[in-house]
């Protein structure tokens, strides 16, 4: 467990991992999930009303789902055991919604279970749409129940972005940005993803506008976004549209933000534009 750090927050099995994961680390984490399952079962059995009972089912569903996700991610269980745990999770989440249809959190939690399965399917190169779609439905319902539920907006944006719908993701993150600072970083990345999508389709003007919007939203430095708009925009202006002045404008923006540009691309720009800076 060299370098591992574990964090249990509020009785919910959560994890921060740096470095390798050993057998003891797996056991510790999964025992936290099992404890959450036991505590939620007790809450269900002792609940005084349907609202409390629904919360218990939702929490237990979340714990089953996280146990299933973690175990599959680290290949600790066979496929049939993963399916069993996942079905236990969904059964509990459905029961929670049946008992109390008024709370956004219950739909958010069930959507998270579907979303977690979808991301695992993606990691394994499988079709994730069948799981992203119900996740999106639950997150949309959560937003309908509570328009200020920024977590549901965030997850909905992630679903749309990973499901090949960047325009919808931009709408979600724009709404989230008004409620939660994370929305700006998500929106920045979504514009870059949309730009890349259009770049690949040779819709250069649309791609360039989206790349520039992504750059505009950035604050400089390490913004934590996965998609880099600078280099592909310089490449678009240099190779595809031959708008060399625009390419140099982006180079200067990248330099001010300490963003790396490949030497080969810079040499191509210098040669084709007849400029050095």
Image (spheres, grey):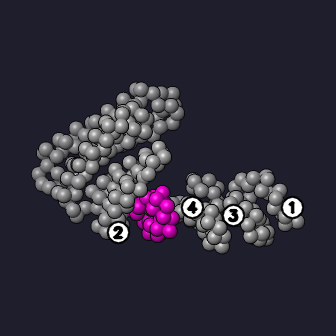
Give the residue at x 38% y 55%.
130
> What secondary structure is marked by label 1?
helix
Magenta stretch: dominant secondary structure:
helix
For discs 2 and 4, the disc positioned in front in the rendered view: 4
> What secondary structure is marked by label 4?
helix
For discs 2 and 3, the disc positioned in front in the rendered view: 3
Q: Mark 2 points at which residue?
A: 147
Asked if 91 appears above or below 247 in the picture, the reply is: above
Q: Mark 4 points at which residue?
A: 193
Q: Determine contact: label 3, label 4, CB under 8 Å.
A: no
The label shown at residue 271 is 1
Q: Name the residue under label 3.
A: 233
In this rendering, does residue 134 appear at all? yes
Where is residue 103 drawn, in percent x and y? 25, 61
Residue bounds of the magenta highlight: 150-179
Q: Earlier in the sequence, mark 3 or mark 4?
A: 4
Q: Does 14 appear in magenta? A: no
Q: Which of marks 2 and 1 is nearer the N terminus?
A: 2
In this rendering, does residue 208 appear at all? no
For discs 2 and 1, the disc positioned in front in the rendered view: 1
- Total marks shown come to 4
Give the residue at x 25% y 44%.
88
Where is residue 148 drawn, in percent x and y? 36, 67
Q: Nearer the viewer, residue 193 or 123?
A: 123
The Cα atoms of the two marked residues, 1 and 3, are separated by: 17 Å
The Cα atoms of the two marked residues, 2 and 3, are separated by: 35 Å
The Cα atoms of the two marked residues, 2 and 4, are separated by: 25 Å
Q: Does 173 appear in magenta? A: yes
């Amino acid at each position: 467990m060299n370098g591992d750090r574990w964090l249990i927050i509020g009785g919910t099995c959560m994890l921060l991992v740096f470095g390798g994961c050993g057998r003891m680390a797996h056991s510790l984490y999964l025992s936290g999930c099992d404890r959450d399952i036991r505590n939620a079962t007790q809450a269900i059995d002792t609940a005084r009303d349907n609202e409390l009972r629904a919360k218990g089912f939702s929490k237990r569903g979340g714990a089953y789902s996280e146990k299933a996700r973690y175990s599959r991610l680290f290949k600790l269980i066979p496929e049939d055991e993963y399916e069993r745990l996942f079905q236990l999770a969904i059964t509990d989440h459905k029961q929670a919604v049946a008992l109390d249809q008024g709370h956004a959190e219950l739909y958010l939690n069930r959507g998270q279970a579907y979303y977690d399965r979808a991301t695992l399917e993606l990691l394994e190169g499988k079709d994730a749409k069948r799981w992203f779609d119900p996740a999106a439905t639950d997150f949309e319902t959560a937003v309908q129940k509570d328009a200020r539920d920024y977590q549901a907006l965030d997850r909905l944006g992630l679903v749309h972005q990973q499901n090949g719908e960047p325009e919808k993701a931009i709408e979600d993150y724009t709404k989230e940005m008004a409620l939660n600072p994370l929305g700006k970083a998500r929106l920045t990345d979504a514009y870059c993803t949309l730009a890349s999508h259009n770049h690949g389709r040779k819709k250069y003007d649309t791609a360039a506008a989206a790349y520039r919007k992504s750059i505009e939203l950035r604050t400089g430095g390490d913004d934590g976004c996965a998609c880099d708009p600078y280099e592909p925009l310089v490449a678009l202006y240099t190779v595809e549209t031959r708008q060399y002045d625009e390419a140099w404008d982006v180079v200067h923006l990248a330099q001010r933000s300490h963003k790396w540009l490949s030497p080969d691309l810079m040499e191509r720009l210098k040669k084709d534009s007849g400029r050095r800076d």
